[in-house]
Image: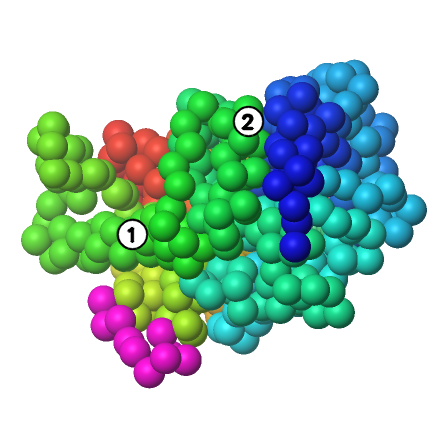
Amino acid sequence: MISDKQLNQFINQLQEKQSRIMVVGLGYTGLPLAECIAKAGFKVIGYDTNISKVSMLVRGESYLETISADRVQELLDTGRFTVTSDISCQDPCDVYWVCVPTPLLNGAPALDSFCAAITSIKTIATKPFLVVISSTSFPGTTRTIGLSILEKETQEHGADFFLVFSPEREDPGNSTFTTKTLPRVFGALDNESSKVAMVLFNQLFDEVHQASSIEAAEASKLVENVYRAVNIALANEWDEICKGLNLDVWEIIELAATKPFGFQAFYPGPGVGGHCIPVDPYYLLSKLKSVGANAGLINLACDLNKKRPQMIVRKIESFLESRSKAIKGSNLLLIGLGYKKNISDLRESPAIEILDLLINLGCNLKWYDPLVASNHSQRDAQRELDLSPQLLKNQDLCVILADHDLIDWDMVLNYSSFILDTKNKFANCHSSII
Ligand SMILES: NC(=O)c1ccc[n+]([C@@H]2O[C@H](COP(=O)([O-])OP(=O)(O)OC[C@H]3O[C@@H](n4cnc5c(N)ncnc54)[C@H](O)[C@@H]3O)[C@@H](O)[C@H]2O)c1
């Protein structure tokens, strides 16, 4: 059992910023978090199993469009940020902060990285230490899986370590909020964990909210993302409703959004993408299934979101049919493959599914996304590294799937014969928009 003296020492070390903090997983959430911790004056060790990412950071380069190379260099220049792909050569830290992926495999939660991260922490951790879990998962993951790995071969919890769950709210590309200014939620395993986490978090974040339990904090993250998934499904349904009623869905949502209370605008698009919205509801549903429960509305929203790329393909087919053109052999250009504006992340991007469906239908498919790494290829679709008037003119249809700022939209509008604008980039300003 940790004595009061040891607990106070741990807290003092945090207050004096003498604690060493390791961020495990330096992706979209982990890298900005490491930056936030270093800026607050702590020593941060970034650990990522991806050697090429680590090498880039060491060279002062960035692999995320949301963090510039200048920001990486500034972080290195603080002298408080080091990075490694080999945890075994690191001295023990006081805090380990887990930001590894929690994806789906065949529609079910895949917690391999999560388990591997906690197992690797155990190989170097010496007591006492704090583990903060920020990877999103179903309620119970931290206690039943994380804690049991930490406890294996060690003493009872609370004796050796402190444990909290604190969800990430990173919104890649959103410059209004930083990791520091975003309100932070956490739930702790016990009173001691709660005390040390509060001391640390108050130094890092402007606003901290403590949940009554770890599970409440885990569930709060799922509420946030399930809310988005359900509302996006609804916005896409409104797209179909408006088509049937011969109304402009974008106009009616904008009109509804003039109501200053009780309404948050969600907009139609090609479908849900990224590491959160298409994934997190399934984490919840898997947990519900394990306890014999169900959630009809969430299930329905997931089904609708899954079918959205097929609906976009159907729109393409019916447009071509209206021009007496077969989909097989048609010339199509997909513009923007990232799952959202100004983001190169292709994880779960609906654009990838649309591309695959169109390839299967025998289209002569090209794609253009200036944010996606130039060596990236996508099945049989031809990648275009530049837009040109000739390229646009040669297409039966150009399909806008992500409206990145970097794209020359004037050229797209001026030279495309027809455009399927799933992002309302051109707000029906031209007769070529379908
Ligand atoms: N991306 C977002 O906008 C966002 C927002 C909120 C929450 N989240 C959640 O945060 C978590 C991380 O997501 P992300 O988008 O930052 O993922 P990411 O894929 O961008 O980054 C994860 C990093 O972890 C590394 N990694 C994998 N296994 C590892 C291991 N065992 N040890 C060390 N490093 C390892 C990977 O190489 C990768 O660089 C997920 O649970 C996600 O659901 C993400």
Image position, residue 272 (x, y; %): 40, 54
Label located before the other in sequence (2 or 1): 2
Residue in the image at 68% along x and 33% along y: 9
Q: Is residue 378 visible?
A: no
In the image: residue 361, left or right of residue 388: left
Identity of the residue furthest to the right in this view: 89
Image position, residue 401 (x, y; %): 44, 46
Q: Is residue 294 magenta?
A: yes
**Residue segment shown in magenta:** 288-297
Image position, residue 69 (x, y; %): 72, 24
* Crowd band around label 1 with a 10 angstrom C-alpha radius: few (<14), some (14–19), many (20+): some
In the image: residue 56, left or right of residue 380: right
Label 1 beta carbon within 8 A of ligand 1: no
Foreground residue among 317 and 417: 317
- The N terminus, quarter of image: bottom right
Q: Is residue 128 visible?
A: yes
Front label number (2 vs 1)? 2
What label does residue 204 carry, if any? 2
- Secondary element at image label 2: helix
Image position, residue 68 (x, y; %): 66, 24
- Tell whether label 1 touches label 2 (CB within 8 Å): no
- Type of amino acid at the residue the image marks with label 1: Tyr
What label does residue 227 carry, if any? 1
- Secondary element at image label 1: helix
